[in-house]
Image (spheres, grey):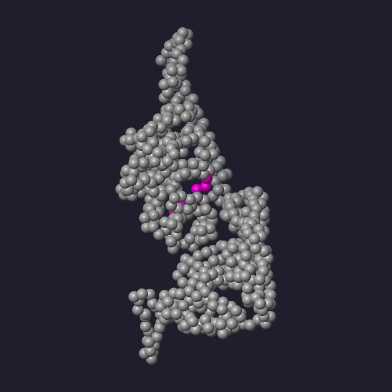
Amino acid sequence: MIGEILLDRYEILAKIGDGGMALVYRAKDTLLNRHVAVKVLREQFATDSQFIERFRQEAQAAASLSHPNVVNIYDVGHTGTTHFIVMEYVEGKNLSEIIKDTGILDEECAISIGTQISSALNHAHQHRIIHRDIKPHNILITHDHRVKVTDFGIAAISSVNITQTGMVLGSVHYFSPEQARGTRVDNQSDLYSLGIVLYEMLTGKVPFRGDTPISIALKQIQDQPIPPRQINPDVSVGLERIVLTLLAKQPTERYQSAEHVVNAMQKLPTDNTMQLSHEQTQQIPVFSGEKDEVKNSVTPKSRTGKKKQQQQKHRIYTILIIFTLLFGLVWAIQRIVPSILFPQEVTVPNIVGLDRQEAEGALRSRGLNLGIDIEVFDNKVPAGHIISQEPAPNRAVKQNRTILVRLSKGPEFVEMPTVEGLSLREARLNLTQAGFILGDETELFDPDIMINTVVSQQPIPGERVKRGTPVDLVVSKGHETQILIPLPDFRGQNLESVRDRLVSLGLSLGNAWPEFSTTVPQNQIIEQNPPPGSDVELGWAIDFVYSQGLPRGTEPPIQQDEHDVQRWTTESVWRSAEVRINIPEGPVQEVVILVVDDFGAREIYRQTHSGGTSINRTVQGRGDGARIQVYIGGRMFLDKQFQDL
């Protein structure tokens, strides 16, 4: 998928995750010039109508939500058998990674995350959507600590029960008891899963573990969790009470809505100061003697006077705070806001060839930011250095703009394949598809070696070399005098007679593919490659598509010409496409276009071009499955069917 452009808009850049149903990629929306996440249904489900329907339901369910703690859905579509959803790209980590790196989270952090998850669930539940798979892996945390709930992959409208009896969806460690039983679930199931997420944040582990999913599910139904304070004494009584309420086995004993959870979380600071555990109450000292007398000597009048003084101090502090805020707001409007709304224009520096640290410094000095568009292997640019940039150098842009770059991973070393003994055409194709470029082709005149056969190669087979290395070939040309033969038109002729004709011309039969035809009689030639009239060398292999006749139970279409003579009609299964290729900024590179169709793989274009240039080519392929492959510098940049271009 890397390098593909979906719907002529979403360029796939890198894989960032996967799940049971789909793969997730980072992509660039070329229309709006922003990064997005693209969730692509796995190929094994692309023909399964049930999975496609669940995939479509995810898009419909999530797209109906608009909340700062829910990942936004931008687009949904399909091309061929590829079904995908385009959603908001969230930079940060998921909660599972944070717990793994940090262990136990402090209470303030857990409360903040729990409150935001509850807020997202409340919004979803108000829209009659149940998530059904709340777990740390589906909770994303941005760099500014914003929580984003994602992956409504098994969500459903509450009025439609897509979970059949005996069939459970989700992750067993975070199941509610009703999910473990396989019965109908509702909003309280999400709240139970939220309780397990809070428990894991506060203790560093889930409440129920087992050797098998079934044993864990039984514990979800039957066992009570160990109170969090027995594992982590720093957990407050109020927060432990919320967690244990969420983990009640009976849905009626849990909070009845996510909004109630939000309210309970927001009251926690007050609960912590006003409510103490039994042990804490026993530790409060009992005052006696003089201290009691002092306390009892305070009269109601003196208490009233102190209260007025405190109120007056609070009023003064409030006025000072408001004045300070107003002063800061005025200063911000005069100094900061204009620079944000109307940033200055700067010239983009040339950072190609610099390492990442140098590039960041050069951009920062002009008020610009560095963004990594994609990291790729490159034989000429050292690892960690910039290959190309967008916008190009010397362009005028606004300050705070992000300059996207291709970052080198250095050379990629692979084992050199052998092409010795292959025809020159096969050798070129094999080398291109293996990620190499052609070097020099030296002719060897030897009548004992079949013409156009590769005699030797450099680098030699089995040697460890950089992918993209030029490969030199020595090719047999038979006799020293080269003979070119104009190729006849074999279409409509019998395959057996064509075999004899090829031998008489000094040519050979290449591939011969049978095909049902309603217009061409059995065993007659439908198409040939190279086409009629081409000049080919002595010994060249010619490919054919020949007719198998009519499919069973089919009558041939008959046409009558102007003399009322019945003739077979001809049919065309050729496809054409206009291809535009943009060569990345940088050095001169070899560009190769291959067509893979009914004639197999064949090369139709091979030239070197300077970096930053573009070429346009019209290409043709035969058959519904015809594909176009584009290689630049030995690396595949495009692989698409004609119908998708």
Where residue 212 sits, quadrant-wise, is top left
Left or right of 555 in this view: 38: right
Residue sticking out furthest to the top: 289
Where residue 510 sits, quadrant-wise, is bottom right
Position above or below: 116 against 65: above
Residue sticking out furthest to the left: 159
Position above or below: 137 against 637: above
Is residue 64 visible to the viewer in this orientation of the structure?
no
Q: Is residue 52 magenta?
A: no
Left or right of 29 in this view: 549: left
Residue sticking out furthest to the front: 448
The segment highlighted magenta reads 85-92
- How many numbered tags mark residues here? 0
Tell me the residue at 31%/46% (across/down): 165
Tell me the residue at 35%/47% (across/down): 167
Location of residue 525 in the rendering, given as x and y in whole percent from the top left corner: 47, 80
Q: Is residue 86 magenta?
A: yes
Q: Which SS type dominates the magenta stretch? A: strand
Location of residue 248 in the rendering, given as x and y in whole percent from the top left corner: 36, 34
Is residue 243 visible to the viewer in this orientation of the structure?
yes
Residue sticking out furthest to the bottom: 563
Location of residue 155 in the rendering, given as x and y in whole percent from the top left corner: 38, 48
Tell me the residue at 63%/73% (across/down): 453
Which of 216/109 is in front?
A: 216
Tell me the residue at 46%/72% (across/down): 623
Location of residue 423 in the rendering, given as x and y in whole percent from the top left corner: 60, 72
